[in-house]
Image: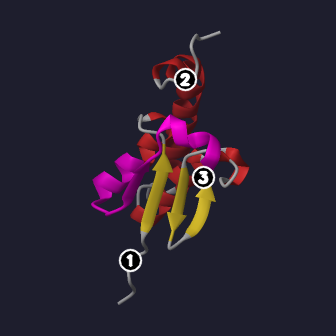
Amino acid sequence: KLAMPSYKLTYFPGRGRAEVARQLFHISGTPFEDIRVPKEEWATLKAKMPFGQMPLLEVDGKPLPQSYAIFRYLANEFGFVGDSPFESAWVDALADQHRDYTSEIQPAMMVYMGMRETIL
């Protein structure tokens, strides 16, 4: 039997761009290490992150950046990609709709998370 990979997800304390990954871990029953980086530590950590961004998923110590790459990887790993090409396209459509939504609310989320003082 193959050993289950170890997963470490690193992001800020808020839900934001890591929340779908956290939900995929929880609904699949897959244990993971949930690293929450305080904003005061971000400046030091940023240079070590691929693309200078979070979230970051580590799978057995190998880094995977970019939230939607992480979501697609986990959905594939845990069997949430649909049973046919059409179902898979709907999963992609929902992901695209989610991306549209998060792009719209990003300025407000930056204020909420303390990363900016005002929306504009």
Question: Badge 2 is on which residue?
Answer: 110
How crowded pointer 1 is (Cα within 10 Å; few <14, some 14-19, many 20+) is rated as few
Give, as a three-letter code, the residue at label 2.
Met
Of the numbered discs 3 and 2, the one sitting upstream in the chain is 3
The answer to whether residue 75 is left or right of residue 30 is right
Residue 26 x %, y %: 30, 53
Give, as a three-letter code, the residue at label 3.
Ala
* Residue 94 lies in the magenta-colored region: no
Question: Badge 3 is on which residue?
Answer: 69
Q: Residue 102, located in which quarter of the rendered image?
A: top right
Residue at the (58%, 10%) spot, across then down: 118
Judging depth in this view, the residue of 48 and 83 nearest the camera is: 48
> Badges 1 and 2: C-beta atoms under 8 Å apart?
no
Per the image, label 1 sits on a secondary structure element best described as loop
Q: Residues under labels 3 and 2: Cα distance?
A: 22 Å
Per the image, label 2 sits on a secondary structure element best described as helix
Of the numbered discs 1 and 3, the one sitting upstream in the chain is 1
Q: Is residue 104 above or below residue 68?
A: above
The answer to whether residue 100 is left or right of residue 75 is right
Q: Residues under labels 1 and 2: Cα distance?
A: 35 Å
Q: Which mark is residue 4?
A: 1
Residue at the (49%, 61%) spot, across then down: 76
Q: Residue 63, located in which quarter of the rendered image?
A: bottom right
